[in-house]
Image (cartoon, rainbow, N blue to C red):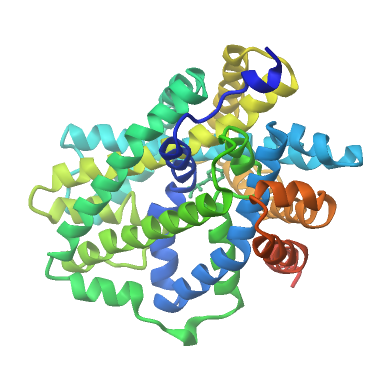
Amino acid sequence: MSDKTKRAVFVTRFGAIAASVGSAVGLGNIWRFPFEAGEHGGGAFMLCYIGFILVVGLPVILSEFILGRASRSNAMGAYARFGRSRSWRGVGLLGIIASLMILSFYSVVAGWTLEYTVQSALGAVADANRDAHHARFMAFSTHPWRPVLWAALFLLTNHLVVSRGVTRGIERAANIMMPLLFGLLVAFCIHSLMLPGAAQGLTFLFKPDFGSINSRVLVGALGQAFFSLSLGLGCMLTYASYFSSSTRLTRTAVTIAGLDTLVAILSGVLIFPAVFTYGMNPEAGPALVFEVLPAVFGRMPGGAIWSFLFFLLLLLASLSSTISMSEISIAYFTDGRRMTRRTATRLSTAIALVCGSLCALSFGPLRDVTICGQTVFGLFDYCSNNILLPVGGMLCSIFVGWHLDRTVVTAQLSGNQRTVHILTFCLRYVCPTAIAVVMLDALGIL
Ligand code: PHE
């Protein structure tokens, strides 16, 4: 059997979509999107976000899909296969490095989530007082070993899934986790909409305030679209290399972008009615999930159960995202470096464990260890989100837009010339320009 025929595929269309939506839906949707939207113009922010998903997000997902399925290879192998110069491989390598960096700091937040899920199940997160939750969160996140332990437990769970392989591990887990995640989300939204503060919460989230749209908000909306769709590091590329040849790429990309946006909006519908009903401050920013929401649950009838279900939801979303982050390096180690899947998975988990522990400790004992004024956690977060992801996305769109043979693009899009033309235009001009603007702004150059 040749290597090509041995390569794993997602067995069903549902599995392929569930795994890709699982990658896209994560902390970015449930934790970050609601407060970004609420603070930055509500409905107006959403319109910008949806606009960016359409003109930048969709073309970049499609470019990753085309490259992944046409090469049937990992992030670096795909560029090696079609790049006329060796330096294109560097783009894939950047993605692999970025994926390990994101996996490391993301596992810390996922570890906090795991601790909160377990504590909620034990009924320990049911205090109604926000200050108590603040004190609790500070004590936990700065503890000399507890955050490391929870991040490690999370990474081991992630390891158990990915080590079982693409079909039996990733696809099967996605088939179970994603329906559960959507079910939980819908149940939560129905509950939230029946609360007395529902109208006030929805107004905060959706009321379009065009006056508050400025360049920072636009930049925030584009960055959010990018992170939320898992773009720029070869994640969608790697998953597309497991798509069957009958998977329709354009339709799959639209489905993923649509479901990802839906989850982001539903998360806002879940959170804000409850926050207003129980008289909490909706503008708490990043503290919303670990300090404000637990206090909201503490005031709610049946709060311990809702708290458990909420953190479980967040945990499922985080796990389906970290699975996809790990797969980027695992695919590279297996087909690029010829390791067995077992060794590749162990290596990827080991790197994440070491780097993740440093990130976890950077709120406590390693708080004063800074590089360029940032803690390890801050540095990983900043470098990957503000530099590696946008650069990766920009180079991928340039590669597919300018460099890749049109016949490959046309064949992957089932010969649909209109889509090829629109896509090529976006990849050549719109995406690189938009991403360059965001990046320069994020780096403080604009
Ligand atoms: N899209 C995920 C989220 O919204 C994060 C992610 C980024 C996942 C990059 C995989 C790769 O949380």
Q: Please tell me whether residue 306 is drawn above or below residue 216 in the rendered image.
A: above
Of residues 53 and 365, the one drawn nearer to the viewer in this rendering: 53
Q: Is residue 151 visible?
A: no
Residue 226 lies left or right of residue 301; in this view the side is: right
Residue that appears at 57% across and 30% down: 327
Count of residue discs:
0
Residue 143 lies left or right of residue 292; in this view the side is: right
Q: Please tell me whether residue 301 is drawn above or below residue 309 in the rendered image.
A: below
Q: Farthest residue in the bottom direction? A: 211
Residue 48 lies left or right of residue 175; in this view the side is: right
Quadrant where the C terminus sits is: bottom right
Residue 392 picture location, percent across and down: 72, 49
Quarter location, residue 55: bottom right
Residue 137 picture location, percent across and down: 34, 44
Residue that appears at 76% across and 52% down: 400
Residue that appears at 25% across and 71% down: 201
Residue 406 lies left or right of residue 6; in this view the side is: right
Residue that appears at 25% across and 55% down: 130
Quadrant where the N terminus sits is: top right
Q: Please tell me whether residue 380 is drawn above or below residue 76 in the rendered image.
A: below
Residue 385 picture location, percent across and down: 62, 51
Q: Is residue 205 visible?
A: yes
Of residues 8 and 440, the one drawn nearer to the viewer in this rendering: 8
